[in-house]
Each structure stands twice: as structure tokens, then as C-alpha cells.
Image (cartoon, rainbow, N blue to C red):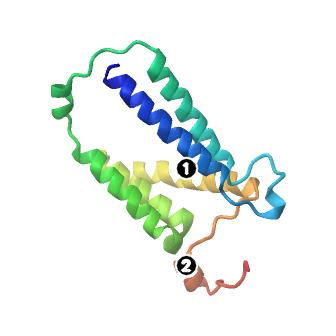
Amino acid sequence: MNDARVGGVIFLAISLAYGYLASEIPLDFWSEQESFNARSMPQLIAAAGICCALLMLVLPSAPTQWRELSRLSWRQPAILLGLMWLYALVFEVLGFALATFVFLNAAFAVLGERNILRMTAVSLPLVFGFWLLMDSLDIYLAPGDLIEALLGTADSHD
């Protein structure tokens, strides 16, 4: 059993646990019979993870070159993980649109993009398009506490 297979077993265990937890996500009464609900995407992610883990277990793999891994730059991935953590923290306050727009632009900057016009030209349609998709699926994305406070609409969707 080489390093890739050990990683495959660990990834399989994590994906199976994630799939189990995804099946435990509580659903509203009216969304239980829907084909797409709060459990759908997590279950698809779990299934994809299980497929990838099984491929890691059955396909041949080259031995891991640990020296090459130690020479990789881990700074950008660490900053991106920090940005994802911050995104989760500010999501409720800023809301989907603003939090996602800020996150995407910050991630672009971390990855080396400096052209603000290009960053905005990519992130705005992406945020708006995803918001339209969620709206067409009747999934409510709250505008965020900040926007509701500014517009005075905190009680309009209750």
C-alpha cells in the first residue's frame, strides 16, 4: 500500500462521512419532495469524492516525491483557505452578493491578478449569474444584515 492508496482510503472515509452528514441536513416540509433541495449539492459532492477516492485506490500511481512537495509554495493556498474562512464569517453580515464579490476579487488578487477592471468583469457576472440561478430554483439568498440595515428591510422577508 503506497502513499496514494493511503490517501485514497482517508479521502474515501471523509467522503463517506460527508455523505452521511449530508443526508442528515434538515429539510423544510415543502422541500422534502423537491428534486433539488438543501441536500442535493452536498450529496453530489460526496458522490464525486467517493468516485475520486475509488479511482485513487484502483488506478496505478507513481511513488510520492516528498522532496518535490517540500519545494512547493504553500503561501497562496494558505491565504486562500484563510479567505474562505473569512468568507464564511462575513457571509451573513454582507450577504451572498457582496461577500462573494469581495471574496472573488480578493482571491484573484492573491492569485496575481492586478487588473481591477478584469477582476470586476469576471466576478460581477459570476455573482449575478449564480444569484439568478438560485432565484430560478426558488432558493432564497438573503441580502445580508448590512444591506437590510441600510435599506431598512430587515422584516420584509419574515
Rendering coords of residue 126 (x, y %): 55, 50
Residue 155 higher or lower than 102, as above or below: below
Number of residue marks: 2
- Residue 112 visible at all: no
Q: Please state which amino acid type lies under the numbered disc 2.
A: Asp
Residue at x-position 56% and y-position 51%: 125
Secondary structure state at the residue bearing disc 1: helix
Q: Which residue is mark 2?
A: 145
Residue 108 higher or lower than 100, as above or below: above
Q: Residues within 10 Å of mark 1 (few under 14, many from 20)?
A: some
Q: Which residue is mark 1?
A: 126
Mark 2 vs mark 1, foreground winner is: 2
Q: Residues within 10 Å of mark 2 (few under 14, many from 20)?
A: some
Residue at x-position 66% and y-position 56%: 25
User: Split into 4 quadrants, where in the image is the N terminus?
Assistant: top left
Gap between marks 2 and 1 measured at Cα: 22 Å
